[in-house]
């Protein structure tokens, strides 16, 4: 039963997650936490580790959570369920969109979905912010936020290095 649940949870999250990995992460988070596979804290830790590694975030999350719940077969099914909707829909919809690419309706469809993705990302960011505030305190949260902003926006350090630095800081700060 867990294999079907893994497949279905990741299939649904990824078939509805228009916009790639960042848009699917809040959907995956909802599925995983509601099913009791991970706590919000565990999910955020897995997300942080996934962001530190190269490659698409959704497949890394699927592999980790699938393995956590169902071993190797669970990881395979979760990753397959993550990739299959995109592959099938991409092949089908790209043919349709290419045929009608100059249509105003098609142009509006792609523009109007962006605010929804922004809201999903905002909700996920707010939840992470709230949990960080409660668990590490306002001082640590502000320190890491300011340092991360400076490194990412002013110094132009690669995001993976900033995440790795935060992981190391968190490990040494226990």
Image (tube, grey):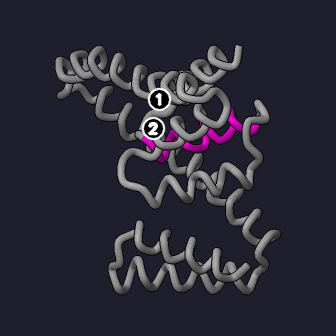
Magenta: main secondary structure equals helix
Query: In what quadrant of the picture does the C terminus appear?
Result: bottom right
Query: Is residue 138 depicted above or below 35 in this figure?
Result: below
Q: Which residue is mark 2?
A: 59
Classify residue 146 by image quadrant: bottom right
x, y percent for residue 2: 69, 19
Residue 123 seen by the camera: no
Query: Is residue 10 depicted above or below 51 in this figure?
Result: above
The residue that appears at 65% across and 55% down in the rendered structure is 44
The residue that appears at 73% across and 36% down in the rendered structure is 37
Q: Pointer 1 and pointer 2: residues touching (CB < 8 Å)?
A: yes
Q: Which residues are magenta?
A: 21-33
The CA distance from mark 1 to mark 2 is 6 Å
Q: Which residue is mark 1?
A: 79
Disc 2 secondary structure class: helix
x, y percent for residue 148: 50, 79
The residue that appears at 76% across and 72% down in the rendered structure is 133
The residue that appears at 30% across and 19% down in the rendered structure is 93
């Amino acid at each position: 039963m867990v294999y079907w649940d893994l497949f279905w949870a990741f299939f649904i999250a990824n078939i509805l997650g228009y916009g790639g990995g960042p848009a699917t992460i809040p959907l995956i988070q909802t599925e995983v936490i509601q099913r009791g596979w991970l706590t919000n804290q565990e999910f955020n830790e897995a997300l942080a580790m996934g962001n530190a590694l190269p490659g698409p975030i959704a497949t890394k999350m699927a592999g980790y959570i699938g393995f956590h719940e169902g071993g190797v077969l669970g990881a395979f099914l979760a990753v397959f369920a993550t990739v299959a909707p995109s592959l099938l829909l991409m092949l089908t919809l790209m043919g349709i969109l290419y045929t009608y690419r100059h249509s105003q309706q098609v142009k509006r469809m792609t523009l109007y979905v962006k605010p929804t993705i922004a809201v999903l990302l905002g909700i996920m960011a707010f939840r992470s912010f709230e949990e960080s505030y409660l668990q590490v305190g306002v001082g640590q949260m502000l320190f890491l936020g300011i340092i991360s902003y400076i490194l990412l926006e002013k110094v132009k350090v690669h995001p993976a290095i900033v995440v790795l630095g935060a992981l190391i800081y968190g490990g040494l700060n226990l």
